Image (spheres, rainbow, N blue to C red):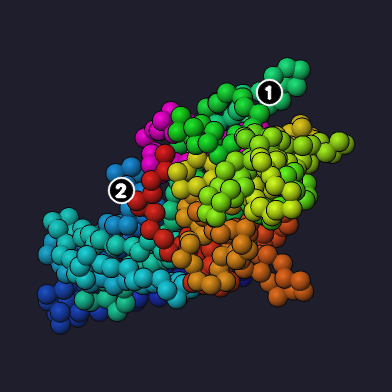
């Protein structure tokens, strides 16, 4: 009984298949009769479809473009002009492709527009076409390019291009101090990693130069004149294929901060002296001038001028001198101009691209110090100066307005928060110390703050080492 049932089912299936095949054959013949130019039976003709535009690699993915560097150093990743290529499918010559720029909606409000070399292009014999996008120099700005042919409803977007800048570095170590101290003044292993963390937000990549290391002889202290001399010597030896986009980070013992000031008085005795102690400057001649007014408008030198040190606190001193031929009961104008140590420097830097990091005190306190993280604030600050911060023509309130800064060729940022008392919130503040905002460039007062200055400046003409 079961066997009979199975046989019956199979017979029904076979009959149904035969009927279906006959119906399909009839439908095909009917279609061939009604559409003779496209017979169903023809297997070599593809189904009809429209022409489409496609981007070619690497323009299909997001990437960075280093706009300040010469294009021939690393094509196609350098330069403001980016040539994007794609093709149409099926590949056909002579088809017009339409392009448009698509700026990222999160671009800064003062970001300049990108530009296309042409709004259209015609495909070549292999169906390919290119378009040139000129990027602005504004760090962090992002752009895509859309491409389409007339039959397409909407453009196909390229990968997004983000504007970055790149600079190169060399780390120069000072030779060890003499025995028995034999102290090393070399860079911490994490120095550049920590520095990069401060420059990522302003879209600067820091990369090793072709020549990435060197040494300089030991000197216990570098005055301004000595720093200039050392910098000039190292500048010549550090030049390589990445010049002039290269900085030299020089690790030294000390380079303390000197200042000078003038004391004036109406003396009523032959002996004159400063009324208070100052912190002694032992690296150069302390007395710049010590004079008395011999006659109205005529000045002559005091005699027996001496620097006298404190009996127990030998880092403190004052200056004394005598008025020659002093007449008892008279009053004589005197003036003494002198150098004193204003502070201990964490680093020195400028637009030449040579940056001095003063790590002697930290190494003597702890052989493992400073780490890259401990050095990062000073190094970021000096690199900021080397990149032009803070401009002397900055709007009021941007730079530090302390009179201490009046004689500087490079100013400091003055932005603070609203706390009581206010707290500095920028790495370009004049003094080391603090964390959080003090380790980064201020960015909340655009366009007149340090981060926005760095992002909008054109660094294609950088003239470092």
- The residue beneath circle 2 is 71
Secondary structure at badge 1 equals loop
433 relative position to 291: left or right: right
Indicate the position of residue 154 as horizontal and vertical percent values. Answer: 32, 77
Q: Which residues are magenta?
A: 234-257
47 relative position to 171: left or right: left
Considering the image in quadrants, where does the N terminus appear?
bottom right
Q: Nearer the viewer, residue 159 or 372?
A: 372
Q: Residues within 10 Å of mark 2 (few under 14, many from 20)?
A: some
- The residue beneath circle 1 is 177
Indicate the position of residue 387 as horizontal and vertical percent values. Answer: 47, 52
Residue 364 in view of the camera: yes
Indicate the position of residue 345 as horizontal and vertical percent values. Answer: 66, 44
Seen in the picture, residue 197 relative to 105 is either above or below; the reply is above
Look at 63% across and 50% down and name the residue there: 335
Q: Nearer the viewer, residue 287 or 249?
A: 287
Q: Report the disc number at residue 84.
A: none
Circles 1, 2 touching at the beta carbon (< 8 Å): no
Look at 29% across and 79% down and name the residue there: 153
Q: Is residue 459 magenta?
A: no
Look at 17% across and 76% down and name the residue there: 32
Indicate the position of residue 80 as horizontal and vertical percent values. Answer: 32, 57
């Amino acid at each position: 009984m079961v066997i009979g049932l199975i046989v019956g089912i199979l017979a029904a299936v076979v009959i149904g298949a035969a009927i279906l095949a006959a119906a399909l054959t009839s439908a095909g013949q009917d279609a061939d009769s009604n559409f003779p130019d496209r017979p169903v039976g023809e297997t070599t003709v593809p189904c009809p479809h429209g022409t489409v535009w496609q981007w070619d690699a690497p323009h299909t993915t997001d990437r960075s473009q280093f706009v300040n560097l010469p294009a021939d150093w690393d094509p196609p990743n350098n330069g403001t002009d980016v040539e994007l290529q794609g093709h149409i499918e099926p590949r056909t010559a002579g088809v017009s492709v339409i392009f448009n720029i698509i700026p990222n909606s999160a671009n800064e409000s003062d970001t300049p527009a990108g530009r296309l070399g042409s709004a259209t292009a015609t495909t070549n014999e292999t169906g390919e076409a290119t378009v040139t996008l000129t990027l602005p120099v504004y760090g962090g700005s992002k752009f895509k390019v859309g491409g389409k042919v007339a039959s397409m409803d909407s453009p196909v977007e390229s990968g997004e291009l983000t504007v970055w800048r790149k600079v190169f570095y060399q780390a120069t170590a000072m030779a060890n101090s003499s025995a028995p101290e034999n102290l090393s003044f070399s860079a911490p292993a994490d120095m550049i990693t920590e520095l990069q963390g401060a420059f990522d937000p302003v879209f600067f990549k820091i990369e090793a130069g072709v020549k990435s290391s060197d040494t300089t002889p030991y000197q216990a202290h570098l005055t301004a004149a000595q720093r200039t001399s050392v910098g000039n010597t190292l500048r010549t030896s550090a030049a390589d294929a990445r010049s002039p986009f290269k900085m030299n980070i020089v690790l030294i013992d000390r380079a303390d901060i000197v200042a000078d000031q003038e004391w004036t008085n109406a003396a009523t005795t032959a002996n004159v002296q400063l009324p208070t102690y100052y912190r002694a400057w032992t690296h150069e001649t302390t007395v710049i001038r010590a004079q008395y007014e011999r006659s109205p408008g005529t000045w002559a030198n005091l005699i027996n001028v001496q620097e006298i040190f404190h009996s127990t606190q030998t880092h403190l001193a004052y200056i004394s001198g005598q008025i020659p031929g002093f007449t008892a009961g008279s009053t004589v104008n005197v003036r003494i101009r002198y150098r004193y140590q204003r502070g201990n420097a964490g680093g020195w830097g400028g637009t030449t691209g040579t940056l001095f990091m003063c790590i002697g005190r930290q190494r003597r306190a702890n052989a493992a110090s400073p780490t890259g993280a401990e050095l990062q604030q000073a190094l970021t600050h000096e690199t900021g100066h080397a990149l032009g911060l803070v401009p002397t023509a900055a709007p009021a309130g941007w730079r530090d307005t302390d009179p201490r800064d009046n004689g500087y060729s490079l100013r400091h940022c003055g932005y603070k928060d609203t706390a009581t008392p206010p707290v500095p919130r920028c790495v370009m503040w004049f003094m080391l110390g603090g964390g959080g905002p003090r380790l980064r460039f201020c960015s909340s007062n655009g366009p007149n703050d340090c981060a926005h200055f760095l992002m909008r400046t054109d660094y294609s003409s950088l003239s470092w080492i």
